[in-house]
Amino acid sequence: MLKKDNFILGVLIGLILPVAVFGLLTLVAHFIPTGTTWARPFEPDRLPILSLVINVIPIRRYFVTYKFEKTGRGVLLATFILMALF
């Protein structure tokens, strides 16, 4: 299913993946005590940017490995939209 050259599929991947990673990072942040060195990356203002970094993997995979331009552009568009919202 994920090996299709479809713009809508790329947008969905680009939106769902960072939202899932944001949820996981938020969950991890609740278990780390504040004020420690380990808590610095998990500050609330850094979590959206950290969750967007995961989109580098599907962008590279669809553009370079599979050569699916439409899907890669969809992921890239979703990433730019999420960055603008941040």
Image (tube, grey):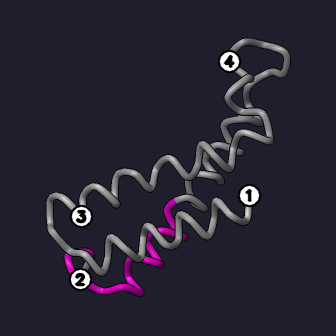
Contact check, label 3 and label 2, Cβ < 8 Å: no
For the point 55% across and 52% down, the residue is 52
Per the rendering, the mark at residue 63 is 3
Mark 3, other Cα within 10 Å: few <14 / some 14–19 / many ≥20:
some
For the point 68% across and 18% down, the residue is 38
Mark 4, other Cα within 10 Å: few <14 / some 14–19 / many ≥20:
few
Could you say where residue 30 lies in the image, as x and y percent from the top left? Answer: 77, 36
- Pointer 3 or 2: first along the chain: 2
In which quarter of the view is residue 47 placed? top right
Residue 44 lies in the magenta-colored region = no
Could you say where residue 78 lies in the image, as x and y percent from the top left? Answer: 52, 71
Q: What residue range appears in magenta? A: 2-17
From the image, state whether disc 3 or disc 2 is nearer to you: 3
Residues at marks 4 and 1, CA–CA distance in whole angstroms: 23 Å
- Pointer 2 or 4: first along the chain: 2
User: SS of the residue at dot 4?
Assistant: helix
The quarter of the rendered structure image containing the N terminus is bottom left
Q: Mark 2 points at which residue?
A: 5
User: SS of the residue at dot 2?
Assistant: loop
User: SS of the residue at dot 3?
Assistant: helix
Count of numbered circles on the image: 4
Residue type marked 3: Phe
Per the rendering, the mark at residue 86 is 1
Q: Name the residue under label 4.
A: 38
Residue 6 lies in the magenta-colored region = yes
